[in-house]
């Protein structure tokens, strides 16, 4: 990949990541505090664990791209995170910092090949696309927890039964 191509992709991905983060935040906010231990199956993560994984992994991907390598560990739910509101506060602070870091990366850092645990070796910029796809996957999982927990499902890529999509009406031209 050439540096100009990586810069082009960065300019495509950054607005998408910023927009997706708004949706991620809305799904995180919808997790009810009193039900954060909910699991649809004994093998599943709890709602709080899944919310943490979703929030943390977005920041982790950005940090890995910015650092030129992915750290091991650190994805465990910290002891100080007790509620979905704690996760949202952490996400607001850390997502913004990670976003600022990747948005200013020079082209030579964007094309640097990063080894992803001997599974993938891609230019750094490609992992920002992984961030989006990974988030969509886990946001979808978490959104299926919401109704059984007594919450409402926010609009994600269109309306939900709880938050219908409304097409704005255009004023009649005179």
Image (cartoon, rainbow, N blue to C red):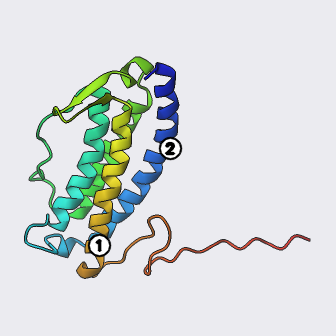
Relative side of 19 to 55, left or right: right
Q: Quadrant of the N terminus?
A: top left
Identify the residue at image location x=14%, y=66%. 46
Which residue does the numbered mark 2 point to in the structure image? 15
Q: Quadrant of the C terminus?
A: bottom right
The relative height of residue 46 versus residue 62 in the rendered view (above or below) is: below
Identify the residue at image location x=63%, y=72%. 167
User: Dot 2: what SS?
Assistant: helix
Classed neighbour count for the residue bearing mark 1: other residues with Cα under 10 Å, few (<14), some (14–19), many (≥20): few
In front: 150, or 17?
17
Specify which label sits upstream in the sequence, 1 or 2.
2
Identify the residue at image location x=36%, y=58%. 25
Q: Which mark is residue 107?
A: none
In front: 132, or 5?
5
Which residue does the numbered mark 1 point to in the structure image? 144
Relative side of 162 to 11, left or right: left
User: Dot 1: what SS?
Assistant: helix
């Amino acid at each position: 990949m050439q540096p100009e191509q990586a810069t082009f992709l960065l300019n495509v991905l950054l607005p998408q990541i910023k927009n997706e983060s708004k949706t991620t935040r809305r799904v995180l906010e919808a997790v009810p505090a009193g039900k954060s231990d909910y699991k649809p199956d004994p093998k599943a993560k709890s709602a709080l664990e899944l919310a943490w994984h979703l929030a943390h992994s977005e920041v982790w991907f950005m940090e890995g791209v910015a650092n030129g390598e992915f750290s091991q560990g650190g994805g465990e739910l910290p002891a100080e995170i007790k509620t979905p509101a704690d996760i949202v506060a952490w996400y607001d602070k850390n997502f913004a910092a990670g976003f600022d870091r990747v948005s200013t990366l020079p082209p030579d850092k964007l094309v640097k090949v990063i080894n992803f645990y001997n599974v993938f070796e891609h230019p750094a910029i490609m992992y920002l696309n992984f961030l989006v796809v990974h988030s969509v996957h886990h946001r979808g999982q978490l959104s299926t927890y919401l109704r059984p927990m007594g919450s409402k499902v926010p609009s994600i890529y269109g309306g939900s039964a709880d938050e219908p999509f409304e097409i704005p009406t255009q004023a009649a031209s005179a």
